[in-house]
Image (spheres, rainbow, N blue to C red):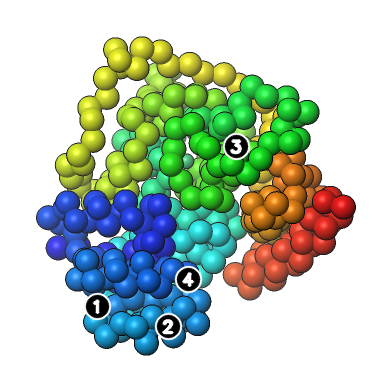
Amino acid sequence: MRRIVILGSTGSIGTQALDVVRDSDELEVIGLAAATSWEPLIEQAERHGVRRIALSDESAAAQAAKAWSGGEVLGGAEGLVELITESGCDRVLNALVGSAGLGPTVATLGEGIDLALANKESLVVGGVLVMALAEATGATVIPVDSEHSALYQLVGAESPGHVDRLVLTASGGPFRGRSIEELEDVTREEALAHPTWDMGGRITVDSATLMNKGFELIEAHHLFGVSLEQIDVLVHPQSIVHALVHLNDGASLAHLGYPDMRVPISYALHHPDRADVPVETLDLATVGQLTFEEPDVRTFACLRLARDALRAGGTAPCVLNAADEVAVQAFLDGELGFTGIAEVVERALDALPPEPVGHFSDLYRADAAARETARELVQGVAA
Ligand code: MG
């Protein structure tokens, strides 16, 4: 039995991961963690027989401890770290949202524990240090994101040096084909209606701006050690082809399947094995058509900003992410228009030139500065 800890278990990836664990003979979940949702977390612990939970929010942890006598409740950022390092787990699924996921990623890899990674920010913000840490302790990072899971399977089957280019596909989001003028007045509800994937609020808005694809490009660069120039983004509205690799002999390999996160989650939890997942077999005759087009980076500036940030290096991707977190939240709260998201991120990148990153503390500092700057910019842009 492989013992699993799930961080972010009450979110979209976390709940699907619990379904995968329930259906698997190979996996046992021994710890669950969330940020603030203590009631659903206790329910999950009861349902899955888990005796140890953690909440990063101290007051949520205190409420859970008062309400639950079925096991131990850990609290705060240290509580999450304790859950990871002292539960005797074999693999951690990090499905936390935002840069709050970086600390638990570091704790997991620092202990040499294999990491199923769904928290994008760990690599977007701390990619260089995170991959170096995994290398140093011998822990494996197995991506959960559908595109990266696809690439992991495609690239992993090839000898080094045979892969020429990587291609990440993108659904294009709900606003594909619109002009920048048509985007100015889109509402929160429109942005949250993703055509093919059912996900949490922030990632759905990031998919609508294409910032999500920008983050994925940065992740792919770190995970697979390929340069920015070797990674293409291709809009593919049906989300059937998850990724492609072009090989040195002219062959191209693609990874296909219906969009269903249980597939990459199961892969990341069972790797190097595979387990049955109750999904339909892909029927291409019924799908009928697969279409592809270039992304419109003029309208969806976030994709360009992500490339620029990766090229600039240092703290720039960290600033990109922090400013985006603040701007997306402001959009969801009705304080900022949709096109204001890219504007705030671009101005934050201009205001905070990249600095070298030698330690994780450099990232935490840059993250805090970028949030403060972005909050001021939100006020300015909204006014
Ligand atoms: Mg994805």
Which of labels 1 and 3 is toward the front?
3
| Residue 322 appears in the rendering | yes
Q: To which residue does mark 2 refer? A: 63
Tell me: 284 left or right of 358. Answer: left
Which of labels 2 and 4 is toward the front?
2
Q: Secondary structure at mark 2?
A: helix
- Earlier in the chain: of badge 3 and badge 4, it is 4
| Image quadrant where residue 111 sits | bottom left
Badge 4: residue crowd in 10 Å (few <14, some 14–19, many ≥20): some
- The structure residue drawn at horizontal position 56% and vertical position 51%, both measured from the top left corner, is 202
Q: Secondary structure at mark 4?
A: loop
Q: Secondary structure at mark 3?
A: helix
- Earlier in the chain: of badge 4 and badge 1, it is 4
- Earlier in the chain: of badge 1 and badge 3, it is 1
Q: To which residue does mark 4 refer? A: 36
Q: To which residue does mark 3 refer? A: 190
How far apart are labels 2 and 4 at the CA level?
10 Å
Q: Amino acid at mark 1?
A: Arg
Q: Is mark 2 within 8 Å of ligand 1?
A: no
- The answer to whether the residue labelled 2 contacts the one labelled 1, judged by CB atoms less than 8 Å apart, is no
Eyeballing the image, is 321 above or below 294? below
